[in-house]
Amino acid sequence: RKEVEQDPGPFNVPEGATVAFNCTYSNSASQSFFWYRQDCRKEPKLLMSVYSSGNEDGRFTAQLNRASQYISLLIRDSKLSDSATYLCVVNNNDMRFGAGTRLTVKP
Amino acid sequence: GAVVSQHPSRVICKSGTSVKIECRSLDFQATTMFWYRQFPKQSLMLMATSNEGSKATYEQGVEKDKFLINHASLTLSTLTVTSAHPEDSSFYICSARQGTGNQPQHFGDGTRLSIL
């Protein structure tokens, strides 16, 4: 079993749609969690940290369920510029990346 | 925000050449730096973790004599791909972390290496 598993997609959604990505991790001792965004042929950029209490940053909401070892990212009112690959990252002293979920937002 | 600079961004060279890639944290001291490689449409693969002043810890299957890592200061780590061959062609990305393991990593721009 992979340490971090994500649905690779692709997710093709129209502008304005709400889209949700899920991620599961295998190491119950994992300490911190993040979502990164990676554009084609570019480096990953930190999108947001994920806390047990859930956190929101504008149109983006991240949730963590430690009991189920599950992380989610919700994007509301999606924009064309949201098109990218979203990487789920689980940290236990070193970071383990999911394979990424590819999102394409279409006009 | 934290800035990590990676240089060069693009390298094309002949088989057998050794290539050095630099990774610098510009506005913070990086306790730990990481080196990844990424093949097209695949996830980042951790190659090694380095702490300033100590030997790098390599992931299983990564040849330490092939990929030499030096982390001489809190702001600079280098990766040298020795005697590179076409199969070493890839996107290499470094990242740096300040402080403890719970902190996020910040990535350099990546180096696209092509070996002819």
Image (spheres, rainbow, N blue to C red):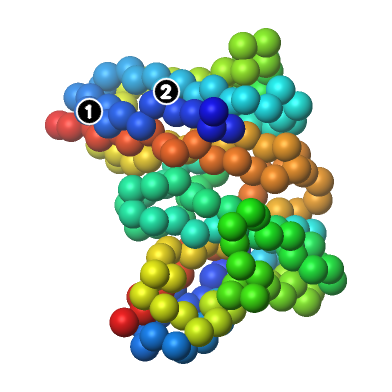
Residue at 52% from the left image edge and 51% from the top image edge: B45
- Front residue of A6/A47: it is A6
Residue B68: x and y in percent read 65, 75
Whether residue B75 is visible to the viewer of this picture, yes or no, is: yes
Q: Helix or strand or loop: what does disc 2 sit on?
A: strand
Residue at 34% from the left image edge and 41% from the top image edge: A84
Residue B111: x and y in percent read 45, 70
Residue A15: x and y in percent read 22, 26
Please give the count of numbered marks on the rendered protein.
2
Amino acid on which disc 2 is placed: Phe
Placement of A63 over or under B58, stated as above or below: above
Taking A33 as reference, is A24 left or right? left
* Residue at the far left in the pictured view: A107
- Mark sitting on residue A73: none
Taking B13 as reference, is B33 left or right? right
Earlier residue among tags 2 and 1: 1
Amino acid on which disc 1 is placed: Asn
Q: Helix or strand or loop: what does disc 1 sit on?
A: strand
Q: Which residue matches tag 2?
A: A21
Q: Residues within 10 Å of mark 2 (few under 14, many from 20)?
A: many
Q: Which residue matches tag 1?
A: A12
Question: Image quadrant of residue A94?
Answer: top right
Placement of A8 over or under B115, stated as above or below: above
Cα–Cα gap, marks 2 and 1: 12 Å
Residue B47: x and y in percent read 60, 58
* Residue at the far top in the pictured view: A67
Taking A49 as reference, is A79 left or right? left
- Front residue of B48/A60: it is B48
Residue at 31% from the left image edge and 82% from the top image edge: B116
Residue at 79% from the left image edge and 68% from the top image edge: B55
Placement of A46 over or under B1, stated as above or below: above
- Front residue of A73/A89: it is A89
